[in-house]
Image: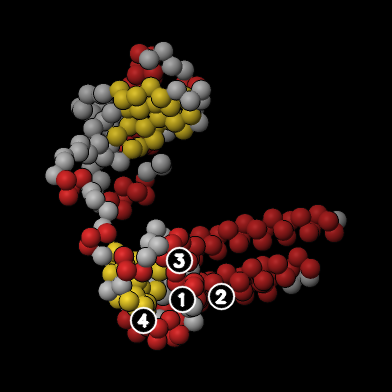
Amino acid sequence: MIYLMIAVKSMALYLIGIAIMRLLGKSTIVQMTPYDLLAIIIIGTVVSEPLISENFLPTIFALAILTALHIIFSKLTLASIGKSLFLGEPTLLIQDGRIIEDNLEKTSISVSQLLSILRSKGYPKVSDVDYAVLEPIGELSIVPKVENTPVTVGHLGISIKDSGLPIAVVVDGQVQRKNLELVSKSEQWLKQQLRKKSIKLQDIIYAFVAEKSKELEIFSRQGVHYGTVKTTPPAMIPVKPLKSLYAFFRRIRI
């Protein structure tokens, strides 16, 4: 009975922990701020406590308080005062190829650490950097000098066809029906395209349709790339136009 209770508590706390991380938001993981880090450490400690004691309900209450506090702090950082108070300000470490030593001391970063970060980002010479800024989340943003800016097709005056975002329609042999609707196609249309290529659905590890060009590309489990299958632009399934890019990414599965 004791082991059963431990198993039930472990499962419950695990699911509660996942739910809390979802409530904290994606930015908690992607952009780790000081209060994000503190919240994760405290939540992890609180969640593990009932596994060695019987204080289950007080733990749930404490987790609710911590989650609410974190959400409140997240909202406060949207204001300029809260941002300065909880996140801090960006710090300029390099300007016009020259290291600003005073700011290095303020941020407790050594010259060796700075040079190591620059090398890891592809800038072995300090003179190649126009600006280097230490962001509040701990990342170093680098702006190269104009002469060291990577050449793009825009600089060369070359026009490239924009096929749009690749929308996955088959993943590991499974048809992504919602994504097919996003590109105005049906499952019947997809199977018809596969029959033309003599490909079985279960043999496909990944296939996508380009959002703008409506071209289908297929990759088999055997490593064979079947190239681009041009499709007709007319829609087979009427779908409502997306109101915003946010709504688009809320629905898509890539």
Q: Which residue is mark 4?
A: 100
Marks 2 and 1 in Cβ contact (< 8 Å): no
Labels 1, 3: front one: 1
Residue 197 pos. (x, y %): 38, 15
Where 216 sits versus 150, above or below? above
Q: Which residue is mark 3?
A: 117
Q: CA distance from mark 2 to mark 1?
A: 28 Å
The foreground one among 99 and 61 is 99
Give me the residue at 39% from left, 58% from top: 122
- Going by the numbered disc 2, the residue's amino acid type is Leu
Q: Residues within 10 Å of mark 2 (few under 14, many from 20)?
A: few
Q: Which residue is mark 1?
A: 111
Q: CA distance from mark 1 to mark 3?
A: 10 Å
Query: Residue 87 is drawn in which quadrant?
Result: bottom left
Residue 143 pos. (x, y %): 30, 66
Q: Secondary structure at mark 1?
A: helix
The foreground one among 22 and 137 is 137
Q: CA distance from mark 4 to mark 1?
A: 10 Å
First in residue order: circle 3 vs circle 4: 4
First in residue order: circle 1 vs circle 3: 1
Q: Residues within 10 Å of mark 1 (few under 14, many from 20)?
A: some
The foreground one among 129 and 192 is 129
Marks 2 and 4 in Cβ contact (< 8 Å): no
Q: Which residue is mark 2?
A: 38
